[in-house]
Amino acid sequence: MNDCLIVSTYPPRKCGIANFSKDLRDHLIPYQPRILMAAMEDPFQTYDYPVEVVWTIQQENKADYTALAHWVNQEIAVDMIIIQHEYGIFGGPDGEYIVALAEQLKKPFLLVTHTVLPHPSQRQQQVLSRLADLASGVICMTERARSLMLDIYAIKPQQTFVVPHGVPDFRPQDRKVLKEQRGWQNRTIITTFGLIGPGKGLEIGLKALAGVVEKHPRVLYVIAGATHPVLLRNEGERYRENIMQQVRDLKLEEHVIFENRYLTNEELGDYLYLTDIYLSPYPNLDQAVSGTLAFATGTGRAIISTPYEYARELLEGGRGLLAERPDADALAGLLDCLLSNPSLQEELERKTAEMGGSLSWDSVAALYHKISLEILERLGAGQLVLSKEP
């Protein structure tokens, strides 16, 4: 039996990459039953992990990284490692401790790039370039990210693979029924979801909403998700309270609802399928990946977004409406256009739905499996045990 080890944050830790790794692991199981986890431990909290977590790393303890590499090198059954890379989940300046692990590994690893910065600091560039150089393969989630890896991080073209962000197996539901269950049957629902913090662009979204409510008084903006745990630990709910004060200042109390809790995939599916317009108002135009935008696309929603990197690629070909600028006036213009044109909403939903199948975790896991096989065969390191064809 050949095993795979994923190095990442992992549930029950509340983190987008943790959820990503859980979904990836679950959907790799049909190909390779033994998918093990090495979980990154939060410096301020410990977790009761499930049995697949066979190793934990204290984020700021550099010795833990090299200890894991030593264990992996000695563990005969482990053939492939997958490292989920995001600067903030690893220890050291710009997460450089993960390089110590990669440099000690004697087995092939896939590097999954969740953040590919077009203007990195010198150390950020050095960390990601070194990891990519050591990796047997590098996963990018968009063509734009791949181009950046080639141009800025000096990776070899033959090392790179473009695999989209996966979308959970949401159960399709009837929008009308979901709205009636909440008493929203006469409302047009706009949603933004995910862990709440300044990078979400809620200030921009609320100002945009204020620009359309007089003409479209039935709109209801649902902001669903808990405050980001790091933000919550550092400053409590001050950010959320500021956002709620903005709602009052803009006199939007009848048009905004906060769902302040960490949502399960089932709950996310409910909110997505009752959504008329998904709003992605990120202010950072360099944002390379957004799981929430992938989910909205995968469930066939009509989407309005600021023109950040991931949105520009995912919504190209008329799959959504992109604002020219990351500001409230630009978003308000698109909201008014879509709210005034139901046939356009239907067209956008049709186009995103057509793409949904390629974003399913079944499809994405099959690509990861195929790439892993190719790498192992190329390196002569054996091959993974197949239990079904991709």
Image (spheres, rainbow, N blue to C red):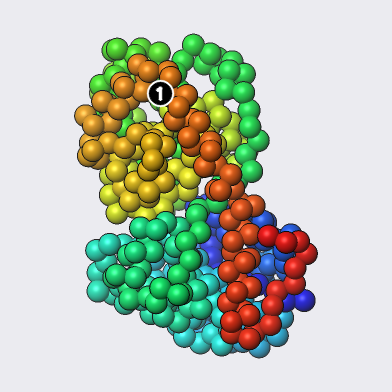
Residue 251 placement, left or right of 179: left
Camera-side residue: 191 or 226? Answer: 191
Kindly indicate the quadrant of the structure image that contains residue 79: bottom right
Q: Is residue 345 left or right of residue 325?
A: right
Q: Position of residue 45 (x, y in %)?
A: 52, 60
**How many badges with numbers are in the image?**
1
Q: Tell me residue 299's x, y (percent).
A: 55, 36
- Secondary structure beneath dot 1 equals helix
Residue drawn at (43%, 19%), measured in percent from left and top? 343
Horizontal and vertical percent position of residue 119? 24, 63
Residue 354 place in picture, x, y as percent: 53, 38
**Residue extending farthest front:** 317
Q: Quadrant of the N terminus?
A: bottom right
- Judge whether 297 appears above or below 181 on screen: below
The residue labelled by disc 1 is: 344
- Between 269 and 47, the residue placed more toward the observer is 269
Question: Residue at 28% across / 31% down in the picture?
Answer: 331
10 Å neighbourhood of mark 1: few (<14), some, or many (≥20)? some
Q: Residue at x 48, y 78 (%)?
A: 135
Q: Is residue 153 left or right of residue 257?
A: left
- Quadrant that contains the C terminus: bottom right
Is residue 10 at least partly visible in the picture? Answer: no
Residue 55 versus residue 274 in the image, above or below:
below
Q: Is residue 217 above or below residue 26?
A: above
Is residue 316 in sight in this rendering?
yes
Callout 1 amino acid = Leu
Q: On the image, which quarter does residue 31 sit in?
A: bottom right
- Tell me which residue sits at (78%, 64%) in the image: 387
